[in-house]
Amino acid sequence: MKLGFQDYISIKIHQTDLNLTKYIKSKLEDFNLAPEQNLVMMLLWERDGLTQNQLAEKLNKDKTNIARMASSLEKKGFIKRAHPKEDRRSLMLYLTENGKDLGEKVIPVAEEFNDVVTQGISNEEIQELERLLSKIDQNVQGK
Amino acid sequence: MKLGFQDYISIKIHQTDLNLTKYIKSKLEDFNLAPEQNLVMMLLWERDGLTQNQLAEKLNKDKTNIARMASSLEKKGFIKRAHPKEDRRSLMLYLTENGKDLGEKVIPVAEEFNDVVTQGISNEEIQELERLLSKIDQNVQGK
DNA sequence: AAAAAATGGTTGTTATAGCAACAATTGGAT
DNA sequence: ATCCAATTGTTGCTATAACAACCATTTTTT
């Protein structure tokens, strides 16, 4: 085969991801929100009152990451954590007023970000991109 | 607009990247090589004797990351670092015998990995994927 | 009901990743 | 020649990411 460094599609995906992260990080800096913390908040803005475990599943991340991000978001005053009565093992995350206000400001920034990312790319092309990424996901699934 | 969590192509790219990293990490574990350390090694297997600065440029990473990975690879005995006479600021990375032997074993693993990733995807589709990722890269370039 | 298994979180460790501040060296300007 | 700026690396910090080991709680078995 003799593949060169440039020939690995996985490397290209990784590079693009890093560039995207760098960009959104700069956009969120003013709001005291890190990129992954923003993903947690986005899920809470869609539906308040998720457990850390539910977030871990939705974000496909290890529960330790969620725990630390939640702890950080709580310190910043955007969320509160409480054990629900039904199950004292779980930790439920709730938006504070501060966290709700933040959504009003950050959601438009996220949508502008998406506009920039998809500039000059048609809906069909985005769908094709999603299809190919899903295919790759399946190819490495659980392997 | 009202974009839902699922609608962001950047999130999909990020998820795919994480899955790819998880997969290659498991493949490289036996060789005592972390995924990004492997990228450094791959560049050295292509051309021995690069400076940390050159690696940072090729990998589009902050120089601190390279310095720490290089330090780790040196501890593992895969490379040696030395200041070239022409410029005592630079640090040149050289493969050790151990590092060269590693390449014989790891390069085939990387190519198998790429085969798995691209399974059921045509060359044309990979090219289209690369084209769209490049377009996204340009869209967020330096912004 | 008591023991065992599963579930949900936390702590500790290693590996990325980028930024700011710093040190050493080199090259350029005067 | 000396000062200044640019280059190259390092250290310290914060954030992400996964894994192992652990603790508390709940559920399942027996």
Image (spheres, coloured by chain):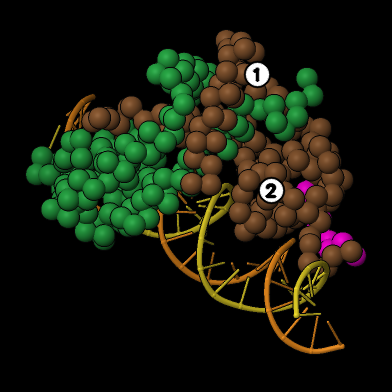
Chain colours: A brown, B green, C orange, D yellow
Rendering coords of residue A87 (x, y %) = 84, 65
Q: Image point 66% across, 44% down: which residue?
A: A59
Q: Quadrant for residue A36, please give it.
A: top right
**Given the image, on which type of amino acid does mark 2 rest?**
Glu
**Does B113 lie within the magenta span?**
no
Q: Classify 10 Å Cα crowding around label 1: few (below 14), some (14-19), many (20 and above).
A: some
Compared across the picture, whether C3 is left or right of B79 comes to right
For label 1, the residue is: A115
**Does A84 lie within the magenta span?**
yes
Q: Image point 22% across, 40% down: which residue?
A: B44
**Given the image, on which type of amino acid does mark 1 rest?**
Asp
Compared across the picture, whether B14 is left or right of A53 comes to left
Question: Which of A77 and A136 lies nearest the eye of the viewer?
Answer: A136
First to last magenta residue range: A77-85
Chain letter for the residue marked with disc 2 in the picture:
A
The correct choice, above or below, for B69 with respect to A123 in the image is below
The correct choice, above or below, for A101 with respect to B94 in the image is above
User: Would residue B114 be visible to someone looking at this image?
Assistant: yes
Question: Which of B122 and B65 lies nearest the eye of the viewer?
Answer: B122
Q: Image point 69% across, 26% down: which residue?
A: B7
Q: Secondary structure at mark 2?
A: helix
Q: Are marks 2 and 1 in contact (CB under 8 Å)?
A: no
Label placed on residue B12: none
* Alpha carbons under labels 2 and 1: distance apart: 27 Å
For label 2, the residue is: A57
Compared across the picture, whether B103 is left or right of A136 comes to left
**In this rendering, which labeled residue sits more in front, label 2 or label 1?**
2
Rendering coords of residue B106 (x, y %) = 27, 46
Q: Secondary structure at mark 1?
A: helix
